[in-house]
Amino acid sequence: MQIRIVFDTGYELTVDLFDNDFVRRWCRLLDQEIVRDSLLQQDTYSSFIPESLARQCLEEAIDSVNGFLKHEFISMPCASDYNDPNFYNQLHAKFEKLTGPDWDHSTRLMVIAPKNIKLAVRHINRYCHRLERRPYVDQTYMRIEFDTIERELLTVDDLQLFHPIVETNTVTLDYSTLGKSLYECFEDGLSPDYAGLRTQQHYSANFILQFEPRQSTGNFKNWCTKHGITEIPIPEIGQLQLGKIVDPESFSKVKKTAKILSITLE
């Protein structure tokens, strides 16, 4: 089975999917989102935008949410905030208050708010993640994101598919859990007792085109040892791989695009 992604430049990216039970189950979720035409173009291309645009998108999302709530629930950031880790940690906490602790326990806001406000809430999270890694750089992956809350639980067998080594041009499952993973706490300089820590338990149709190898987990394991963590949850030390990108030169071609025209399962 393959995924074919057609871009506005005419470039077609093909993914050869692995043949296993999990990938077949995941394809059912992907097929649902393809039929619904729910791809989020702006979110998907956030990996490649300049910092000035990421800041603008975040501030527009904050302004939309504050306007809907009719008070300043989130303070508009100033220039110095973008280099302050505490700003992003506070923003993550505000996002979790807006959404609820997980997808099964949404706040009233996420039930009654119009679609544009729900999307603005998502963008607060998206651009917080995009901006908090300093220095700001173009990323070497593309998150294919859909406007969906459809989630399925990972089984014990599924967890065995997570692997610490991700090679060039690999397609992996995205992190579909509200909060921060233990690995993200490590990356963002937080302690393991961070209130928003969540180990991945669910999967959705969202996936990642990984154009470069995943960074080694050696430093992460040392960090865990330092904090007394002897048993690292399996999803924290790897990613679940779905398939391989056929074209070895895909990254340079995708970076020249501005829109995905279609995604098909074949």
Image (cartoon, rainbow, N blue to C red):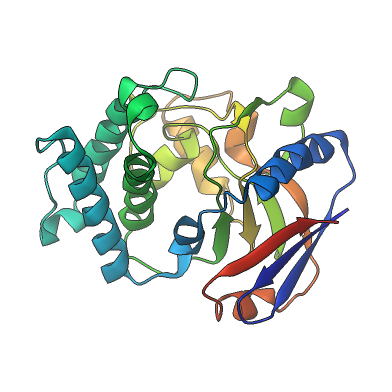
Is 26 or 81 nearer to us in this picture?
A: 26
- Horizontal and vertical percent position of residue 258: 51, 74
User: Going 86% across and 56% down the picture, which residue do you hit?
Assistant: 266
Q: Is residue 85 visible?
A: no
Choose between 72 and 173: the one closer to the eye: 72
> Does residue 118 appear left or right of residue 163 in this picture?
left
Nearest the camera: 5 or 113?
113
Compared to residue 97, the image places residue 216 above or below, namely below
Q: Is residue 210 above or below residue 27?
A: below
Q: Nearer the viewer, residue 174 or 99?
A: 99
Residue 33 figure quarter? top right
Q: How many numbered marks appear? A: 0
Q: Is residue 79 left or right of residue 118?
A: left
Q: Is residue 22 above or below residue 153?
A: below
User: Measured from the top left, where is residue 182 in percent x and y?
Assistant: 47, 33
Residue 199: in sight, yes or no?
Answer: yes
- Residue at the spot 46% in from the left edge and 56% down from the top edge: 43
Q: Residue furthest top?
A: 105
- Report the residue at 19% width, 51% height from top: 84
Q: Position of residue 249 (x, y in %)?
A: 71, 79
Above or below, 74 against 165 in this view is above
Q: Residue at x 72, y 29 (%)?
A: 159
Residue 102 point in image, percent of width and height = 45, 23
